Amino acid sequence: MITYDYKFRVAYPDTDQMGTMHHANYVKYYEAARWELFRSIGVSYNSLEQSGVMCPVITMNFKFIKTTRYDELLTVKTRLKAMKGVRMWFTYQMYNEQNQLINEAETEIAFVGRDNWKPCSAPDFLLEAIQKHTTTQIIDK
Amino acid sequence: MITYDYKFRVAYPDTDQMGTMHHANYVKYYEAARWELFRSIGVSYNSLEQSGVMCPVITMNFKFIKTTRYDELLTVKTRLKAMKGVRMWFTYQMYNEQNQLINEAETEIAFVGRDNWKPCSAPDFLLEAIQKHTTTQIIDK
Amino acid sequence: MITYDYKFRVAYPDTDQMGTMHHANYVKYYEAARWELFRSIGVSYNSLEQSGVMCPVITMNFKFIKTTRYDELLTVKTRLKAMKGVRMWFTYQMYNEQNQLINEAETEIAFVGRDNWKPCSAPDFLLEAIQKHTTTQIIDK
Amino acid sequence: MITYDYKFRVAYPDTDQMGTMHHANYVKYYEAARWELFRSIGVSYNSLEQSGVMCPVITMNFKFIKTTRYDELLTVKTRLKAMKGVRMWFTYQMYNEQNQLINEAETEIAFVGRDNWKPCSAPDFLLEAIQKHTTTQIIDK
């Protein structure tokens, strides 16, 4: 099971007139977080696309627990939960500087061909990187 | 049960390098759609905030079925599914010009005080507008 | 000289914690406004790209005069000021519901090949549409 | 004269279907860059707002020189050019990993009261921090 802690600060345009981060922006930071998890095992998302594979989101579920404000330094604990066939699943937990859980989410991501948008397997170099960094076997190609 | 059809065009910055609308932008258009539903029964979301009540999102779940591209004219069929106590629930279905379902979502929204962020009831003028436009009784205050 | 009035409402995520529309969002609405000007003369921006020509921004200058708030209905008066060689120039004036000028901008836009990003002429069908809708001759190809 | 180098990676939703960073996003990164310059001298933008002063943009001018793509690591060289009365001026130069200049901009920023939006002087703690970090006297209160 691969995990990664992604840190960022809430930017000014992320806020709305409630004075807190707008709910659409969590989506963007979780996307950054999952691809930084991949970078941490040596695979940039860019290299996936360059190899002809894109990773669109199939489902996403968010639970908003606490609010967060401009300039707060947040940590997204991301976990690659499973990769199976043409799909993979990530979970996310966002914490503030007081280590309070402020948001939870999970996303189901597909592998599709860049040219035809048809489901496809993950590239071998990604599977190998994941196996190398995983103690338990989570890949069922 | 109140429903509303919200139409919009996919804007250029909504797209990403996949050539389709980025998944975070569905969140923004569904937000616009639910407040246009309220406007259609005579209550602007702005008037809610001016009366001291804000409506942050508590949970949101999205299912991506088909992609959509720049300049497509989309329709969001929004339904106020229920309003109970300090919460309300909306469902959304997004259709393209070929009347294909491209996305489904549901959001759970809270009513909170603008000054204290504490859960509160919906303002009476909203409840009255909803009752006036609803055949079946969906409100259980 | 071709002009077009584009109307829109300030969306909730366009606001920031100042309670007004964040300055980056003017950029997006002016982009929508200029392509609606083109649509008004029968040429969608999409058709430009489909013909192999893209229109990136080269320079943009903004002057912020008054603030604007959530849900305000704004009008962007857009003017295609000139089209010459591989460039075109638009000016924009944004008005609120009280007809107060709240923002002014100008953008210089290039025509480039979609495949090579090299400067190119505007497609003939755009030039013809512009001539058809222009009393004075503004095109100097 | 105070300068600061702000680094960031182009995020996926920053791109559009041209495959490059959408021009509105430069605005957001320059905003982050100028407040990181302030943080580097010990003053967070947040502390300005907490002291009752906001800093809206009055004018902004951008020149797009080269494009940039997803995941590129960019550097914004920001310079506080001048602070005089109720205004300050920043200039920005954005460089890619090949140290090529890809964008230039300048912004004029106002100091206004958070409660009344009226022009006001910069807070003393900001002026002191700037003087402390500036060799030449640029402040003319």
Image (cartoon, coloured by chain):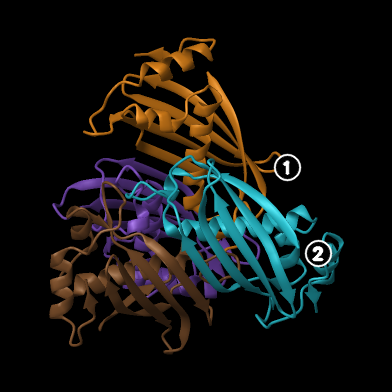
Chain colours: A brown, B cyan, C orange, D purple
> Residue B80's quadrant in the figure?
bottom right
Between C96 and D1, the one nearer to me in the picture = C96
Q: Report the front residue among C127 and C83.
A: C127
Q: Are marks 2 and 1 on the same chain?
A: no
Q: At which x and y percent is residue B90?
A: 65, 66
Circles 2 and 1: CB atoms closer than 8 Å: no
Residue D85 visible within the image = no
Q: Amino acid at mark 2?
A: Ile
Residue at position x 45%, y 47% in the image:
B68
Query: What secondary structure is found at the residue carrying circle 2?
Result: helix
Q: Position of residue A83 (x, y in %)?
A: 27, 73
Q: Mark 2 packing: few (<14 Cα in 10 Å), some, or many (20+)?
A: many
Tag 1 secondary structure: loop
Q: Which residue matches tag 2?
A: B130
Quarter of the figure with residue B64: bottom left
Within-10-Å neighbours for mark 1: few <14, some 14–19, many 20+: few
Residue under pointer 1 = C98
Q: Name the one closer to the observer, A83 or D65.
A: A83
Question: Measured along the vertical axis of the image, is residue C110 above or below residue B27?
Answer: above
**Could you tell me which residue is drawn at 45 percent across and 57 percent down?**
B65
- Look at label 1 and name its amino acid: Gln
Say above or below: C131 vs D136.
Answer: above
